Amino acid sequence: MGGDGNRAYGHKTFSRSRSHFRDRITADGSDGWPVAPGRYRLVVSRACPWASRAVISRRLLGLEDALSMAVADPIQDDRSWRFTLDPDGRDPVLGIRYLSEAYDRRETGYPGGVSVPAVVDVPSGRLVTNDYQQLTLDLATEWTALHREGAPDLYPAKRRDEIDAVMAEVYEDVNNGVYRAGFATHQKEYEEACAGVFRRLELLSERLSEQRYLVGDTLTEADIRLFTTLVRFDPVYHGHFKCNRWKLAEDPVLWAYARDLFQTPGFGDTVDFDHIKRHYYQVHSGINPTGIVPLGPDLAGWLSPHHREQLGGRPFGDGTPPGPVPPGERVAPQGRPA
């Protein structure tokens, strides 16, 4: 998510670009990037659903000490993601003001957008990968030597075909569908995308009416990927992206499912509604030229009982929940339900 074309959203047909830098950090270092504690830095925006997948995975797996994290300002400028939340406007580990500097060190004059999540090699300051689809799968499967004790198996081998199938449908119709609707420039284009979003949400609601999680009886990568869109649905996608056939809070199954995940350690404690709302409404000036950020919706409902435990399921399987959020990574009060 990112690039210098923010003002163009809503004025040209939307097409999500593929990740350009697709190196992998693996246990055997086969791409030249071996898993190693402290070597890499994960750069994210709490506003971005694609980056938020990595934030949640890192926390669930207990990789906070092994993989440090930089949080970019939710408001981009023409050079994209910037570190203006940090003292002196520089990331304290990488020493850079803009994520684009790490891209430039990898490929000078790279013509594509500067996106998050991104993993940067700390010693060289070079970008390693911005492959948001593969990154979290590798955190779950390649970084196992550095997982915390009791870390869940988010991509269990016996379930991968089913997880992959569910994630592909969720990506096409929901994760990316809301963007195709929101950035549409023609009525037919918008209507087709919006109809696809709600058609898939209705199927997911039906699936989740009888099972607590998307695949099996434990949390998996599929739940993480659906959650990062659902948690943004009423605050930004319903109004800002015109995905307004109904609100998430109006579907009893999906609303309860989303609250169940939000209240699970590792999910809601990574969400910053303030960053989310300010990013979408202030950066996408092509579709919200005034830059006004709405006051609603009321966030208190996220903490209300969901009763999904009645469906059974074991969130962490044979593992355990993650511990408290590290002090330096806690979401500010204005970004959380009261």
Image: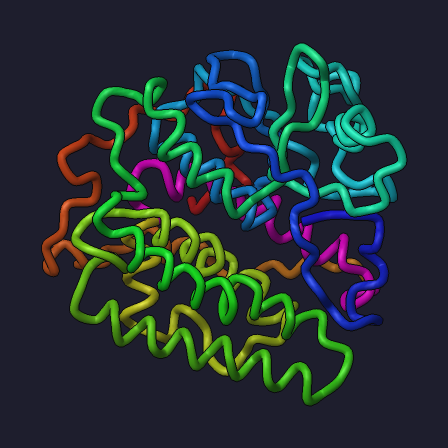
Percent coordinates x, y for residue 251 in the rendering: 34, 74
Image quadrant where residue 206 sits: bottom left
* Residue 313 horizontal side relative to residue 64, left or right: left
Query: On the picture, is 247 further left or further right than 265?
Result: right
Direction from residue 30 to residue 95 in the image, left or right: right
Q: Does the magenta stretch include residue 281?
A: yes
Of all residues, the one furthest to the front in this rendering is 30
Quarter of the rendering occupied by the C terminus? top left
Classify 247 as above or below 322.
Answer: below
Q: Coloring scheme of the render? A: rainbow
Quarter of the figure with residue 20: top right
Q: Position of residue 2 (x, y in %)?
A: 73, 48
Question: Is 329 covered by the magenta stretch?
Answer: no
For the point 34% across and 29% down, the residue is 61
Tell me the magenta residue range: 262-289
Q: Which residue is drawn at 38% across and 75% down?
A: 250
> In the rendering, at what x and y percent does residue 63 appear?
41, 23
Q: Is residue 213 above or below residue 115?
A: below
Please tell me which residue lies in front, 51 or 146: 146
**Residue 328: x percent and y percent?**
51, 20
Q: Residue at x 31, y 37 (%)?
A: 265
Q: Decide: is 176 above or below 23.
A: below
Numbered disc total: 0
Closer to the camera, 319 or 297?
A: 319
Residue displayed at 42% across by 32% down: 139
